[in-house]
Image (cartoon, helix red, strand yellow):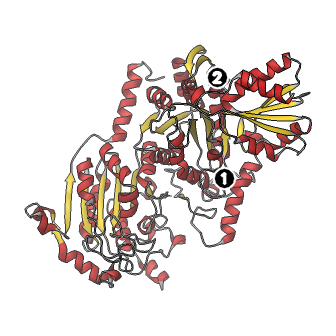
Amino acid sequence: MIIRGDEPEQVALLKKLYKPGNYFMQGNEALSYGALFAGCRFYAGYPITPSSEIAETMARELPKLGGYYLQMEDEIGSIAAMVGASWTGFKVMTATSGPGFSLMQENLGYAAMTETPLVLVDVQRSGPSTGQATKGAQGDFFQARWGTHGDHPIIAVSPTSGQDAFWEVIRAFNIAEKLRNPVVFLFDGVLAHTREQIRIPNVEEVEIAYRKLPANEEEARLPFGDPHGDGVPPMPLFGHGYFTHVTGSTHKENGLRDVYTPEVHDRLVRRLHRKIEQNRHIYEKYEEHFTEDAEILVVSWGVTARPALGAVLKAREEGIKAGLFVPKTVHPFPGERMRELGKNVRAVLVAEMNLGQMIIEVERYLNDDVLLRGVNRIGGVPLTVGKILREIRGVA
Amino acid sequence: MAKEIYSTYPMIKYLRKEALPTALCPGCGGGTVLNAFANAVDGLKIDPKDLVVVSGIGCSAWIASPYFLADTLHTTHGRAIAFATGVKVGLPDKKVVVISGDGDLASIGGNHLLHAARRNIDITVILVNNMIYGMTGGQVAPTTPFGAKTTTSPYRNIEHPLQISETVAAAGASYVARWTTAHVYQLIESIKKALQVKGFSLVEVVSQCPVQFGRRNRMKEPAEMLRWFLKNSVPINKAKKMKPEELEGKFVIGEFVNRERPEFVTELNKLIDEVQEHFGLKGE
């Protein structure tokens, strides 16, 4: 049984429970409602600040929709239970923060290797280690990309507001389902706890996607094959009599382990990467403001994109030709667009709440004649319009 | 030769033939456990389509995954029960079975074992306790007997072994039994009971590892290890009357617990019904 979220019964429940309109709520709550609209009916988690309100909202709302909230004994168990539930057909999500995200890394790699759709929300908090437990940060950019071992592909999405989180988490679910891949959702402690106006849409406004199921017995026998040439194998769910074997070890197209043949490993891992590369149109997303004639480009993501936009608007008022580029899917990085934008600007400023992480990606796509500078702040206090504006003036 | 043996093996219909022969060492108790499990499934006439078998990492994780012909999920080290928890919630009408070793389920996975027993989720765990880390080369385990020699306790083990069945029974499981690979028929009966119990069930099988454990502890022949099990096994009723010092180094065998307690997934679904009822969402 797949709880898809779009059956008439589920649509009726959503309509009855969540009237369209404007509400005043936290980013964490907005994100949770987005997940419910996307069809998430299984949540396994372990409480950690500043992500806990997501667990609380899901615990309260999921049973109303016939969905399941499980509070597991730890973060490792949480992502493990999610993978198990995903193989039975559920759309699944967990939310965690800093240290919890670190604990989930091994099974995130397992999900990538076994091509298990899931959404892992990391409400970024200040670190390293326990750091400032309740404060926001953007320090997990590379943990999302390289936290687990091996040559694995990953997709990471990052919203810029509570309202954005509602829609972007739906997009994250759709990407996970379409590509049969885990998706990391990089939220942060500031947006998570900011209360603002959030519009809950009509159910009909929300487009939701579903994983590809085997069309016949033959496809079901190759749970890790590529029958359609798009790199995405149909997923034979447990309980349908397919006798599917799933392992995190290197496996052949039929799922059976083969860790001795170099070609088998090469074929599998290259397909995992190709699956992500060739389907860029499914997940690539970025926002641009005033980039057509920009001489100074601000690149920012997540929470920092908001003061960055404020600073660009102010700079424009002052006659400075500033523009803003905001990757919304941060991994894989929208490098081609970055390269194009970089050709026409004199300076690039990368604003983020860390000591310089996305700037490393940005640098890869810039020519040497472009002045590149980071605008960074740590300590749990977000960057401000004034601080970013001063940096823009500094290179103007 | 392997082909001939398999072709006359009555339980072959339950095995994934393309994965055979097994990777288990000669004399390993894993074969006995796989055989006992297949016999229990056969005896209860369970359709393998109604089974999902989950395992972790290590020799014993291989016993049913990939060899048993069912949906099989071979997971990360120590986490099999947590993965199985998600499977059970999604497929409450299927039998979800975890087969793995002592290092996997009781050491790195000890936390999940305790909490699954506490929740009393309807999962059957067959825990193969060979008292050592076999696949990684014979290192000391939390189940290694006091005084035994291993590659990482080359002089002698100075730690006390974890009593798995006693611990899981105390944590709240519905059914707990311990046997050794020398008690095959009792083992099959216990696996059958465990599969039928509505709640968390654990069958601990003390199993021989002649290659890694026996050879370093003067029992390099599998039969010597089985004789050691038989000689030192004490039925639980008898054990209750014995002093702790008399039980030192003995294997207490039998049923530890067989009781009814509210089951997790049933309660979860009941809760959902109540909530939907309360908010007037029934029959939407």
In primary-sequence order, the first of circles 2 and 1 is 2
Question: Three-letter amino acid code at disc 2?
Answer: Gln
Q: Nearer the viewer, residue A372 or A322?
A: A372
The 10 Å Cα crowd at callout 2, few under 14, some 14 to 19, many 20 or more, is: many
Left or right of A274? Residue A143 is left
Which residue is labeled 2 in the image?
A163
C-alpha span from label 2 to label 1: 33 Å
Residue A357 locus on image (x, y percent): 69, 42
Residue B19 locus on image (x, y percent): 53, 70
At x 71%, y 57%, the residue is A271
What element does badge 2 sit on? Answer: helix
Which residue is labeled 1 in the image?
A233
Q: Please indicate, yes or no, whether residue A173 appears anywhere in the rendered image.
A: no
What element does badge 1 sit on? Answer: loop
- Chain where mark 1 sits: A
Which dot, 2 or 1, sits closer to the camera?
A: 2
Question: Three-letter amino acid code at disc 1?
Answer: Pro
Quarter in which the C terminus of chain A is drawn: top right
Residue B185 locus on image (x, y percent): 25, 69
